[in-house]
Image (cartoon, helix red, strand yellow):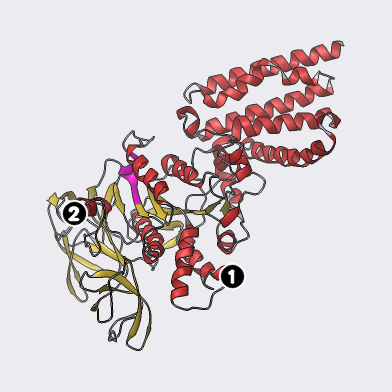
């Protein structure tokens, strides 16, 4: 609590004590404010000075964010480490964007141009993968009176001047934006293109659209972090913002150690060249953990406004919600279910609703998207708890991780019976246009077979597999092939870690063609055991490890060989 802050406002950032610790005003009664400090507060006592900055919690947006690691309130961790060592001291204040580094600025706007929010003044080649567009900030509109010539400059140097109704405005490469306020856009569209993750169970069975929302719930050890790593590495988006909000330190360490070593499969450059990491582990102050998710989505919206496709991966929203619960308890607010604040669902919605496909501000026609994917860590894997239930009401894709699949070494451990995607109807035209009607037909058939297998397993447990009809035994065998030869995927084998859409289509089609051909052979009294033992079965199982470049020819050869072998078995059955 701090008194004498009559001029301050709720959400203002303040500096506390002689070390000038960063804090935020959560509520006010008269001139008394309740402040949540983002750093360790031991040693603070009555009489400590509190100074308001007069600004809400904001982030700096400009060149230098990519290939960087921030904490929850956008302090650059590598620079802080260089300044203070491995143990960062309290009160360390380092600008989010390096003020000494220079960037090659190429002007786009010219003197006399009429510009408004979102119009591009110039560009900076921030990394080899991303061209950074320096845009007119929101709220600035007028005529360009001066633009700096092409050259290398720091982010603080003036690059353009604009004559506005309120006088001349000097602009630099840096913008500031309050993290809890959504960045504006011209128009929002229905997401209609899938985000290709290279993960077969996601792309084929439960796809997510670019600009969509998804949740990955699951108990400890079921593979949430690996799924998010795969999405970060392989998704066909331009930029990835990975938010480690409250996960264990060792998990975040793995991310920080692994990501700089990963290569971008699209251009062979380091993946960090198009990645922003936000590291906020479970031992850091709860207020910073709560702010980290907004910091990440704001950075993502900024790149979206340049016309890029951005993926935001939050790991995990459960830890963020626990920070929200702890802060709510300290403010003595009325608790809701399981102690979470009553506004938990609305806060989650505020995060996920900032995803979408939009027409960006500015005269230039630009479309950008933000795809929000949050991991959920329900205690004991019980998705009936409030965070999981609130998330399910908001997101349109639900990839439910199953501990029993993880224990059986089936990864990704996404349960195909409890997961769903509500984007299938809007994405179906794209799949049909790219691969024909058979792509969605195969998906429907595969889902039907997997559901049938679930029902048949109940019968098998009661009376044994021998009691099943040949047709039902074939269903069980086909479902096993779908699970083992298609859905199961090894993230640590290069040939299997990523599957393009064309390869996914052919892999599933091989299994379903086998099913169709076997059913026709069974009608001709073919020997069922002989059908299951044909040589082509093994080739179908190994196909997912085949090189993507030669896979088309391999597919045609396997299909032809399989049909011939099944025909031979069927012909033998007819003779008998």
Q: Is 71 in front, or is 176?
A: 71
Residue labelled with disc 2: 83
Q: Position of residue 369 (x, y in %)?
A: 43, 53
Q: Position of residue 199 (x, y in %)?
A: 52, 38
Give the SS element for disc 2.
helix
> Is 263 left or right of 164, judged from the image as shown?
right
> Is 449 left or right of 553, judged from the image as shown?
right
Q: Is residue 444 above or below residue 378?
A: above
Residue depicted at 60% across the width and 32% down the height: 486
Which dot marks residue 337? 1
Quarter of the image that includes the N terminus: bottom left
What span is in magenta?
A: 270-277
Q: Position of residue 106 (x, y in %)?
A: 18, 49
Residue depicted at 34% across the width and 85% down the height: 32
Q: Is 400 in front, or is 576?
A: 400
Q: Is residue 543 above or below residue 310?
A: above
Q: Is residue 548 above or below residue 388?
A: above
Q: Is 506 in front, or is 99?
A: 99
């Amino acid at each position: 609590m701090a008194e004498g802050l009559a001029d301050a406002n709720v959400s203002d950032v303040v500096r506390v004590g002689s070390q000038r610790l960063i804090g935020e005003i959560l509520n006010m009664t008269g001139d008394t404010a309740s402040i949540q400090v983002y750093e360790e507060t031991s040693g603070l006592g009555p009489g400590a000075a509190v100074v308001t900055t007069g600004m809400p919690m904001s982030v700096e947006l400009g060149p230098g964010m990519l290939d960087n690691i921030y904490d929850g309130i956008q302090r650059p961790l590598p620079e802080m480490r260089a300044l203070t060592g491995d143990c960062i001291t309290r009160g360390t204040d380092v600008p989010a964007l390096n003020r000494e580094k220079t960037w090659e600025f190429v002007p786009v706007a010219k003197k006399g141009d009429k510009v408004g929010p979102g119009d591009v003044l110039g560009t900076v080649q921030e990394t080899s993968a991303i061209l950074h567009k320096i845009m007119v900030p929101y709220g600035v509109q007028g005529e360009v009176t001066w633009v700096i010539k092409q050259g290398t400059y720091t982010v603080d140097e003036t690059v353009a001047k604009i004559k506005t109704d309120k006088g001349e405005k000097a602009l630099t490469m840096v913008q500031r934006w309050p993290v809890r306020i959504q960045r504006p856009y011209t128009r929002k569209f229905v997401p209609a293109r899938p985000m290709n993750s290279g993960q077969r169970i996601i792309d084929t069975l439960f796809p997510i659209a670019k600009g969509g929302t998804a949740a990955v719930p699951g108990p400890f050890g079921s593979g949430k972090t690996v799924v998010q790593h795969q999405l970060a590495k392989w998704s066909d988006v331009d930029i990835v913002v990975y938010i480690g909000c409250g996960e264990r330190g060792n998990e975040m360490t793995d991310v920080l150690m692994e990501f700089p070593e990963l290569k971008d499969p699209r251009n062979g450059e380091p993946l960090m060249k198009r990645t922003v990491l936000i590291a906020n582990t479970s031992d850091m102050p709860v207020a910073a953990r709560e702010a980290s998710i907004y910091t990440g989505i704001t950075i993502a919206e900024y790149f979206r406004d340049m016309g890029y496709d951005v993926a935001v991966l939050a790991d995990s929203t459960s830890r963020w919600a626990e920070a929200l619960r702890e802060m709510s308890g300290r403010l003595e607010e009325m608790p809701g279910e399981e102690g979470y604040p009553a506004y938990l669902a609305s806060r989650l919605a505020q995060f996920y609703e900032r995803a979408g496909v939009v027409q960006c501000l500015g005269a230039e026609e630009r479309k950008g998207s933000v795809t929000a994917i949050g991991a959920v860590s329900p205690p004991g894997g019980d998705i009936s708890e409030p965070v999981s239930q609130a998330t399910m009401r908001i997101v349109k894709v639900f990839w439910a991780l199953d501990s029993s699949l993880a224990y059986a070494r089936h990864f990704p451990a996404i349960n195909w019976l409890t997961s769903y995607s509500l984007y299938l109807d809007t994405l179906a035209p794209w799949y049909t246009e790219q691969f024909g009607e058979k792509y969605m037909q195969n998906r429907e058939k595969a889902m039907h077979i997997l559901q049938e297998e679930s029902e048949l397993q109940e019968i098998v447990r009661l009376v044994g597999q021998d009691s099943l009809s040949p047709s039902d035994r074939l269903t069980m065998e086909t479902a096993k092939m779908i699970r083992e030869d298609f859905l199961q995927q090894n993230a640590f084998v290069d040939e299997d870690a990523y599957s393009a859409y064309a390869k996914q289509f052919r892999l599933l089609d091989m299994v379903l063609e086998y099913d169709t051909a076997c059913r026709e052979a069974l009608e001709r009294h073919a020997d069922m055991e002989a059908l299951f033992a044909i040589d082509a079965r093994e080739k179908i199982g190994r196909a997912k490890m085949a090189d993507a470049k030669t896979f088309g020819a391999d597919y045609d050869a396997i299909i032809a060989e399989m049909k011939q072998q099944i025909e031979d078995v069927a012909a033998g059955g007819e003779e008998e």
